[in-house]
Image: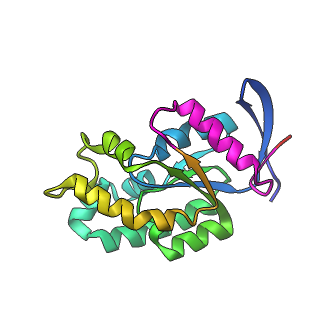
Amino acid sequence: MSEIKHNAHTEGTDAVFELHKTVVLVGMMGAGKTAVGRALAARLGVPFLDSDAEIESAANMTIPEIFERDGEPFFRAKESQVIGRLLDAEKGILSTGGGAFLSELNRQMITERGVSVWLRADLKVLWNRVKHKDTRPLLRTADPYATLRALYEARVPVYAQAGLTVESDGETSIENMVDRVVNAMLTRPDVLERK
């Protein structure tokens, strides 16, 4: 498959990049995977894909509705199918749900066919971003903060296995986060090169 060259703008200079692998954004709910992913795809001139949006479109239901009707194991199986299909599509930026990277199958597919980038944010930042939203089925509990903390503590060691890590401190604009991700990707010539 031939590589596609894309015009992109980063750090105040016009640059042309060559993306060699699909970049899969992983991390906790509220880390900014969708917002950063959209802006990153626009910057690089490549497609933006969202595994949760693809699942919702295929099922004609929201993620919370799927969880409620069919349960989390059913959702996770569909999620793996969708991630596999998206990894085989045109190279681009793929945003995944917070639990997607926990699956060993998903981690293996992502490592073999793309590269994972962990948007690492601390618990306080994540809580500030999700506490007023009712769209997170895993947080529909009596104590959503305690639930988020437990998920965070369980998931961080798995996210740490990602190919690249980029800090999301809660103070940084989306454009500056995109700069951070691009700079991290440029450390891996097998992922992204400046032409």
For this orientation, the residue located farthest to the top is 12
Relative to 18, 87 lies left or right: left
Whether 118 is drawn above or below 172: the answer is: below
Residue found at x 46% / y 43%: 32
User: Which image quarter holds the N terminus?
Assistant: bottom right
Whether 8 is drawn above or below 142: the answer is: above
Relative to 132, 52 lies left or right: right
- x and y, in percent, of residue 118 in the image: 55, 54
Residue found at x 81% / y 52%: 3
Residue found at x 38% / y 67%: 154
Q: Is residue 82 visible?
A: no
Whether 32 is drawn above or below 155: the answer is: above
Relative to 29, 47 lies left or right: right
Residue 90 or residue 105, whichever sits in front: 105
- In reply to whether residue 92 is colored magenta, the answer given is no
Q: Quadrant of residue 182?
A: top right
Residue 95 or residue 74, whichever sits in front: 95
Q: Quadrant of residue 79?
A: bottom left
- x and y, in percent, of residue 27 in the image: 47, 55
The residue segment tinted magenta is: 168-193
Residue found at x 66% / y 55%: 22
Q: Is residue 102 visible?
A: yes
User: Which image quarter holds the C terminus?
Assistant: top right
Relative to 160, 129 lies left or right: left
- x and y, in percent, of residue 8 in the image: 73, 33
